[in-house]
Amino acid sequence: MTLLLSCYELGHQPLSLAWPLAFLDEAGLAATAVDLSISPFPKSEAKRAKFVCIAAPMHTALRLGVEAARRVREINPNAHICFYGLYAWLNRDYLLSEGLADSLLAGEVERPLLAQIQAVLSGEPVMVVADPIMARQSFPIPKRASLPGLPEYAHYMHKGTAVPAGYVEASRGCLHTCRHCPIVPVYDGRFFIIPLETVMADIRQQVKAGARHITFGDPDFLNGPGHALNIARALRAEFPGLTFDFTVKVEHILRHRDKFPELAALGSAFVVSAFESVSETVLARLGKGHTVSDMETALNILAQAGIAVQPTWVAFTPWTTLADYLAMLDWIRRRGLIPHVPTVQYAVRLLIPPQSALLAENEDAGWLGALDAANFSYAWRHPDPRLDELHQAVSQVAEQMGDGDPLAVFAEIERLAYGMDGRTPPADPLLNLFQPAPPRLSENWFC
């Protein structure tokens, strides 16, 4: 028996289960798939499984995946456990040394994962770990029927309504090499197109299952701008009432500014874009490829097209000064972005996982500590202790206030940040400045 486990994928019905299920189905192999963010740990299935696959596309997923692996080991010590995904490969030394994994895969993993499963079920040896797999593969339609229904996952929220949101990917990997991104050590600037016919078939089955909005989960939807537009056009032609959102780099907003009016007309409701910082120093350190001025231009392009923006931030880095953090708050305030920024974004602290591109150029930095393997990241301490103290305080606000009134959340974070500098926040009122609330998903992006 084969058991597939997903732990967390930002509130989306997990493609990390649907893709492998489709490949296994093509090969005539049965499998049980469980999303642990929705369903309880499948103790009886884990006890009988000969091969257990655990998806680890992100930091949070790996943390929960390790807990799942420990439970599998307790009740079925002979099961072969394979971790797959970005964070599985980055943290391979820990997973293997702790006995949590018998093999690991990253990159374009579905066909190699199928080969691993077939080998173990046949009693043949398998490769424990290999370099990330960059071979192109043909894609069947993701198999979603056995997964929890879309109403169990993130909803699209706008103007007082909430409707189920589907999730697809039109490409995987990324052309860009931002230094802090976990995609870079695996894909190293490569990306792979998923055929339009496959993407549309996946959208089709999710609409049938109740989706009224689609999230394109590509690291950057406009890595292949022609492909993206073709899919958006096909989406609008077949489902004229469907809205969608996507992730896009600031530099792609500028480079493809002429495409955004059409994307808006085709149903683009909002975009997620990694602004990261209002410090030119931090942007350069992260290798973002854009400037603060570019961010200003991007806001104007999106506003003129009528597309909302949800900027993401790396609010705390070793190079971020207290003045930088205050400048970020001021920048958000003056541009009317307060309701566009989820609370958690004010507390995001730079993660430096094993294999990170940041390590080579910062190995002798005084702020960089040792690898905390059990937490999948290198420890670091800010040169200014006030920033670490502020991070703890803002994290508590994010935990306690969550996605409550964004104005109240922002006012509390301003109070903390300015207080850390011995100052009082701006006296300009925040109330009644930002209407209507921008469209968003009920589950916010974070790592």
Image: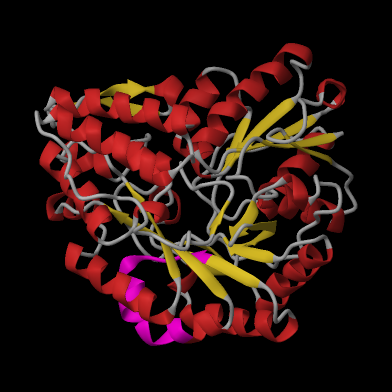
- Tell me where residue 153 appears, x and y as whole percent: 69, 47
Res 321 quadrant in image: top left
Between residues 287 and 152, which one lies in front from this camera angle?
Answer: 152
Horizontal relation, residue 131 to residue 25: left or right: left
As drawn, is 385 to the left or to the right of 173? Answer: left
Residue 308 position, x and y percent, is 44, 67
Q: Is residue 106 above or below residue 349?
A: below
Can residue 350 be seen from the camera position used here? Answer: no
Position of 53 relative to 282 (above/below): above
In the image, what residue occupies the spot 50% across and 86% down?
Answer: 262
Q: How is the image coloured?
A: secondary structure
Q: Is residue 241 above or below residue 42?
A: below
Magenta-colored stretch includes residue 360: no
Segment tinted magenta in the rendering: 246-261
Prevailing SS of the magenta stretch: helix
Q: Position of residue 355 (x, y in %)?
A: 36, 39
Check the image and name the residue furthest to the top. Answer: 74
| In the image: residue 303, left or right of residue 423 | right
Where on the picture, by quarter, is residue 272?
Answer: bottom left
Image quadrant holding the N terminus, namely top right
Let me know if residue 147 appears in the view.
yes
Depth order, front residue of 335/231: 335
Residue visible at 48% across and 35% down in the picture? 402
Closer-to-camera residue (375/407): 407
Magenta stretch encompasses residue 255: yes
- Tell me where residue 100 appears, x and y as whole percent: 60, 22
Seen at 37% across and 49% down, the residue is 181
Image point (82%, 36%), residue name: 2
